[in-house]
Image (spheres, grey):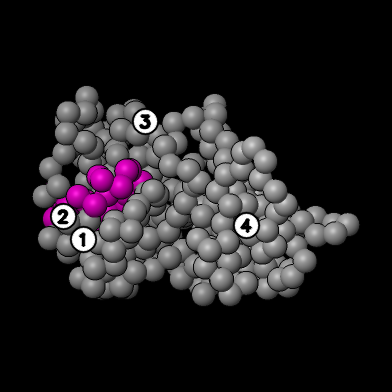
């Protein structure tokens, strides 16, 4: 497959480029960055000391030379890339988080014309964690209070993280309720006793934390914790490559990593 990478000069972009270059069945053909980036015109593999022959560009028409784009940028950038993918028939993997309802709707509409993997977290381990949470929530569906904790680096701009939201949604779905109806997003001052059936969220932003997530099921006399910790972005990159291979046989539709991994 011919692979395009968005945000080619960023940390995640570098991780994705390196992963694609090391994959014998994938070929890096396009490296995108924002207009005005100092990296434009540079070889996409320069940070590795490798000559790939792929120059970083801000031209979205370059996507005509790719079978699939992997995008971990910002919602506004991803939505522009989405339009170009539809124009050129390029499949899309969206690891970007922080979309509003209109952004999610635009992705749904585009999936009628191209194949898309849209997931809040591409890590195989995190998606295994989602499955464990589903099972736990079905068992612990009464008498347990649920708290979702997440921590990320100081530069992450959305909160709670897309992964934390997906964790809360997984528990809520297993309980037969909608997350917005039971979520407690913040606590301050005299909050009163906890509402039965609520799902609380706590957020930390600091340093260079790649990503920590814990869901606690707090009962009487016991507490069950399901935790995933990322120490490198390499797991997101490897999951993205699995998603790209999955899309090789798809023409349209929207999929998540649970589908990619055969978990549901």
Q: Which marked residue is nearer to the observer: mark 4 or mark 3?
A: 4
Residue 203 drawn at (x, y percent): 57, 40
Lower sequence index among marks 4 and 1: 1
Q: Which mark, by number, is residue 84?
A: 2
For the point 54% across and 26% down, the residue is 207
Residue under the point 67% across and 41% down: 190
Mark 1 crowdedness (10 Å alpha carbons): few <14, some 14-19, many ≥20:
many
The N terminus sits in image quarter: bottom left
User: Which stretch did the figure color magenta?
Assistant: 62-81
Q: Between disc 1 and disc 3, whose residue precedes?
A: 3
- The picture places residue 9, in percent across and down from the top left corner, at 30, 33
Label 3: state its secondary structure: helix
Do residues under tags 1 and 3 come within 8 Å of each other at their CB atoms? no
> Marks 2 and 1: in contact by CB < 8 Å?
yes
Q: Is residue 176 left or right of residue 145?
A: left
Marking on residue 48: 3
Specify which label sits upstream in the sequence, 1 or 2: 2
- How far separated are the C-alphas under marks 1 and 2? 8 Å
Q: Secondary structure at mark 4?
A: strand
Q: Indicate which label's residue lies in the foreground, 1 or 2.
A: 2
Residue at numbered disc 4: 199
Few, some or many C-alpha atoms within 10 Å of disc 4 (few <14, some 14-19, many ≥20)?
many
| Of the two numbered discs 4 and 1 in the rendering, the one whose residue sits closer to the viewer | 4
């Amino acid at each position: 497959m011919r692979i395009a990478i968005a945000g080619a000069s960023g940390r995640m972009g570098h991780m994705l480029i390196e992963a694609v270059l090391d994959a014998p069945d994938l070929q890096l053909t396009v490296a995108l960055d924002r207009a005005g980036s100092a990296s434009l015109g540079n070889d996409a593999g320069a940070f590795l000391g490798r000559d790939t022959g792929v120059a970083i560009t801000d031209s979205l028409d370059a996507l005509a030379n790719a079978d699939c784009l992997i995008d971990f940028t910002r919602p506004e950038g991803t939505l522009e890339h989405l339009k170009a993918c539809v124009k050129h028939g390029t499949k899309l993997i969206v690891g970007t988080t922080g979309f509003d309802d209109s952004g999610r709707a635009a992705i749904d509409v585009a999936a009628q014309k191209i194949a898309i993997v849209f997931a809040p977290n591409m890590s195989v381990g995190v998606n295994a964690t989602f499955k464990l949470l589903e099972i736990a929530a079905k068992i612990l569906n009464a008498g347990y209070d649920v708290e979702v904790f997440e921590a990320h680096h100081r530069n992450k701009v959305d909160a709670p993280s897309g992964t934390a939201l997906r964790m809360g949604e997984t528990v809520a779905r297993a309980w037969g309720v909608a997350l917005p109806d039971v979520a407690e997003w913040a606590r301050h001052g005299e909050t009163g006793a906890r509402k039965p059936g609520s799902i609380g969220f706590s957020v930390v932003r600091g340093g260079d934390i790649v990503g920590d997530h814990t869901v606690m099921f707090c009962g009487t006399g016991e507490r069950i914790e399901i935790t995933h910790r990322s120490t490198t972005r390499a797991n997101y990159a490897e999951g993205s490559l699995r998603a790209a291979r999955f899309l090789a046989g798809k023409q349209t539709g929207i999929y998540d990593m649970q589908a990619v991994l055969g978990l549901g």
